[in-house]
Image (cartoon, grey):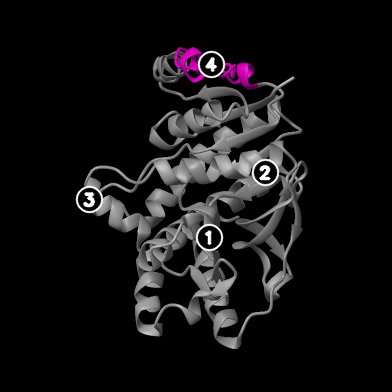
Amino acid sequence: MRKKVTVVGSGNVGATAAHWMAAKELCDVVLIDIIEGVPQGKGLDLLEAMPIEKRDSHIIGTNDYADTANSDIVVITAGIPRKPGMSRDDLLNTNYKIMSDVVGKVVQYSPNCIIIVVSNPLDAMAQAAYKLSGFSRNRVIGMAGVLDSARFRTFIAAELKVSVENVTAFVLGGHGDTMVPLSRYSTVAGIPITELIEPARLEQLVQRTRDGGAEIVKYLKTGSAYYAPSAAATEMVDAIIKDKKKILPCAAYLEGEYGIHGMYVGVPCKLGSAGIEEIIQIKLTAEEQAALQKSADSVKELVSVIGV
């Protein structure tokens, strides 16, 4: 019997995540949204693509959480983007209200699920989902590091003209300006990139990684990235469904790891059928630790606004 994954929010990120999952035949997918007709239309369109793709994934679109009952994983992409003239606190409070509503219904219908949060601001929304759900910390995971490290890997591969498959990269910290790309832990076929790329050029790639989302927004003007974010969420779903024990950078609730307490921050995690099965602690230099702490402090600032 195939696993059941619910995707909350049928906008670009949600619908594309449903597409990736169905195309890989990972699971059956329920696409849910408050807007009538949109999840139903996108769900049916995707279902009708399955004979062409030779996949037996079943997809439905709905506005009713009863259809999501007993989901194994729930991916939350719901939320509004920041609009011109809107303060950060306004955005936070609006998305917190949406998260409260969504998580309440998810817990009601799928009390044993694992939640993956994609909504922004990512780390604060993951913390909100964790507190609102009452789930253990291994079952509420934020998607950020997989996306950020994929961007870093893209830029490294292009710079060195090598296959992206050869490139491993680690990005820690919050999802945003304070993320911490770890160059010395990033490799090409096992060779540290610090031996392959000049420091000044490497710093440019690190900065481009930090600005990865903003660069795409600048091009699109009225939207933001969705192919890579949805692919990142799908990789996490894949690791959990297949119990891969795959080490991926995820936003996790830290209880003393890396010297950080009571905060969602991006760290290397082992993902398997139980969700986060282990938080991997790597040795950081004083400079890297300070950067990670700065990142955690910026998350703390956000969560204090919404009181979680």
Name the mark nearer the viewer: 4 or 1.
1
- What's the residue at 33%, 46% (across, down)? 224
Residue 250 left/right relative to 254: left
Residue that numbered label 1 is attached to = 166
**Distance (Cα) linking label 4 and label 1:** 37 Å
**Distance (Cα) linking label 4 and label 2:** 23 Å
Dot 2 surroundings within 10 Å: few (below 14), some, or many (20 or more)? some
Instruction: Establish if 200 lies above or below 64.
Output: below
Q: How many marks?
A: 4
Kind of element beneath mark 1: helix
The image shows residue 226 at horizontal and vertical percentages of 39, 42
**Distance (Cα) linking label 3 and label 1:** 28 Å
Residue that numbered label 3 is attached to = 219
Q: Which range of residues does the magenta coloring cover?
A: 47-68
Q: Sequence-wise, which precedes: disc 4 or disc 2?
A: 4
Residue contact at pointers 4 and 3, CB within 8 angstroms: no
Residue contact at pointers 3 and 1, CB within 8 angstroms: no
Q: Sequence-wise, which precedes: disc 3 or disc 1?
A: 1
Residue 131 left/right relative to 196: right
Residue that numbered label 2 is attached to = 239
Question: Which amino acid is tagged 1?
Answer: Asn
